[in-house]
């Protein structure tokens, strides 16, 4: 019985339905909540921050719209792995990818975010169904929330929830140009003038 009790938490990937009380409570505590559903594919799964393909990851641009100095933002990421059978929602945890989140603060749009450390990042990626994090954001600043799998080209679906006590402007971006690594072009070699040595023989 004890094994069965713990096993249900290990294999069950379904999200329990919220009852009316919980929904009303969430709406009261977090009137600015927003939900997104999308997928990691071989195109938009750029891997972790250390990868050159990191900017391919899907990002979410976050701005505070209301007259408020700052607010707490709760970010909840739920992973839905691909399964061979669409009839069963039960999958082993081993079929889940190690996932993580990065939060970037844009202080200067002329500076590549790739050249500055993120405001928050998961130092260790977790093979989990759901992960959450609370960060503090401020009015007048631009933030990017980037959802990542540990390795590029991973495939899975996900649900993303933002919870806040004020209204936020959240926009999905398919790729983040300011996260592209700066391309350094090597200086062109200046062509040196070519001098030809001509040997002149004078016949006496």
Image (cartoon, helix red, strand yellow):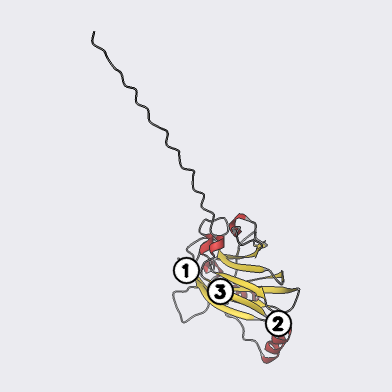
Q: Which numbered disc, 3 or 1, marks the residue that appears first in the sequence?
A: 1
- Residue 83 place in picture, x, y as percent: 47, 74
Give me the disc on residue 41: 1
How many labels sit on residues? 3
Q: Which numbered disc, 2 or 3, marks the residue that appears first in the sequence?
A: 2
Give the quarter of the figure containing the C terminus. Answer: top left
Give me the disc on residue 32: none
Q: How many residues crowd around disc 1 within 10 Å: few (fewer than 14), some, or many (20 or more)? A: some
Secondary element at image label 3: strand
Instruction: Tell me if residue 172 comes above or below residue 181 in the rendering.
Output: below
Secondary element at image label 2: loop
As measured in the structure, the alpha-carbon distance from the residue carrying label 1 to the one carrying label 2 is 31 Å
Residue highlighted by disc 3: 172
As measured in the structure, the alpha-carbon distance from the residue carrying label 3 to the one carrying label 1 is 16 Å
Q: Which numbered disc, 1 or 2, marks the residue that appears first in the sequence?
A: 2
In this view, the residue farthest toward the right is: 69
- Residue 117 place in picture, x, y as percent: 65, 57
Q: Nearer the viewer, residue 193 or 14?
A: 193
Residue at image point 61% right, 76% down: 170
User: Which marked residue is nearer to the observer: mark 1 or mark 2?
Assistant: 2
Residue highlighted by disc 2: 30
- Residue 166 place in picture, x, y as percent: 71, 80
């Amino acid at each position: 019985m004890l094994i069965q009790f713990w096993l249900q938490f290990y294999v069950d990937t379904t999200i329990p339905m919220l009852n009316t009380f919980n929904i009303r409570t969430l709406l009261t505590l977090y009137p600015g909540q927003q939900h997104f559903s999308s997928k990691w594919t071989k195109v938009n799964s750029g891997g972790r921050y250390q990868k050159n393909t990191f900017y391919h990851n899907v990002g979410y641009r976050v701005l505070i719209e209301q007259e408020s100095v700052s607010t707490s933002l709760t970010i909840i990421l739920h992973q839905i792995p691909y399964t061979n059978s669409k009839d069963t929602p039960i999958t082993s945890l081993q079929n889940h990818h190690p996932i993580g989140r990065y939060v970037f603060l844009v202080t200067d749009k002329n500076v590549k975010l790739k050249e500055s450390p993120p405001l928050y990042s998961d130092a260790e990626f977790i093979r989990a169904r759901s992960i959450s994090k609370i960060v503090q954001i401020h009015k007048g600043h631009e933030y990017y929330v980037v959802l990542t799998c540990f390795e590029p080209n991973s495939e899975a679906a996900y649900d993303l929830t933002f919870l806040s006590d004020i209204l936020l402007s959240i926009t999905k971006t398919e790729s983040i140009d300011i996260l592209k690594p700066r391309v350094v072009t090597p200086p062109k070699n200046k062509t040196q003038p070519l001098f030809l040595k001509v040997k002149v023989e004078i016949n006496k």
